[in-house]
Amino acid sequence: MKPLHTKEEWAGSLIIPLYRERYIQTPWNTKDPDKQKNGWTLKKGDWALWFFNMRPIGNSPELFYNICRAMADMIGSDEEVDLLIGVEMAGLPLAGALSITLYSLGIHQRFGWTRPLPEKVRLPLEALKLLNGMEKGVASYGQKDFVEAIIEPGDRIAILDDMATDLGSKIIARLLTLWHAKKQGTDVSCNKIFYFLNRGKDNRAKGEQFAEKDEAALKPEKLIVDYVLEFDQQLPKLTKPMFPAEFEAVMAYQKNPDQFQDEDVQKEVLEAARKDRG
């Protein structure tokens, strides 16, 4: 399949509409009064000045199509992927829409998705401990399980999501997928991770370093990580649509997020946003 655009071209064309349509949110452009007042807290507990939220992407069909087409260009020619597993929740509509987009381009791509564990976990080893203590799936009725997909012997599986700060939730999804396949007695591989927006540091290198993990139950191996939009690279394009103070704050946050864990710094930034919003 010949890509319509390169990843960099897609990223450059999508970063501004993502901000203007409020999928990239800051205290300046969010409509959520709580986030205007308090900002965001990431999964690992750190305070964040901005957030990428693709859950309401159904409100922007054209933008969603372009996101899916960009991801189709990224992974559509990868003949080593038989099954995409979306990470709940944002990865679920993305997996389905991406499959349809690829089908329209002549590529038959199967997909499925993960379901939440009964207890909230943040680390892969926490998920592993929880799974080891369980004998049943999501519920004692129907066919619900932690992975909703028909997994075939020999499947080469990739994990799919909207964004990543680190790879924790993707590795948990990988763990669930491998656990589910093992429970079925099915031998599969799962060593690729695809997502749309990267906000973390060195995630590709972290994927390669996963092979060095000494926890055998996590099935450590080299993980291939790829994504469309590198936030740090595209951030300069937001100079015009953002308020000057907003752009400067996000730039400073990206360079040193640790300094923004100070409550006084947070209050100063949030007050600047309040003044610019009027």
Image: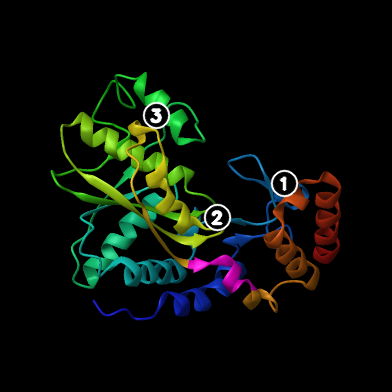
- Residue 245 sits in which quadrant? bottom right
What percent of the width, then of the height, locates residue 104?
23, 71
Q: CA distance from mark 1 to mark 2?
A: 15 Å
- Residue 110 sits in which quadrant? bottom left
Choose mark 2 or mark 3, whichever is in front: 3
In the image: residue 8, left or right of residue 15? left
What residue appears at the point 20 percent right and 67 percent down from the top-left corner? 107
What percent of the width, then of the height, locates residue 50?
66, 57
In the image: residue 11, left or right of residue 155? right
> Label 2 crowding class (10 Å Cα cut-off): few <14, some 14-19, many 20+?
some
Sequence-wise, the earlier of marks 1 and 3 is: 1
Q: Secondary structure at mark 2?
A: loop
Q: Which mark is residue 34?
A: 1
Main secondary structure of the magenta stretch? helix
Q: Is residue 130 magenta?
A: no
Q: CA distance from mark 1 to mark 3?
A: 34 Å
Residue under circle 3? 128
Relative height, residue 231 to residue 54 (above, below)? below
Q: Secondary structure at mark 3?
A: helix
Choose mark 1 or mark 2, whichever is in front: 2
Q: Which mark is residue 18?
A: none
Q: Which residues are magenta?
A: 229-235
Q: Amino acid at mark 2?
A: Asn
What residue appears at the point 29 percent right and 32 percent down from the top-left corner? 145
> Label 1 crowding class (10 Å Cα cut-off): few <14, some 14-19, many 20+?
few
What residue appears at the point 41 percent right and 35 percent down from the top-left corner? 116
Q: Which mark is residue 53?
A: 2
In the image: residue 203, left or right of residue 95? right
In the image: residue 174, left or right of residue 109? right
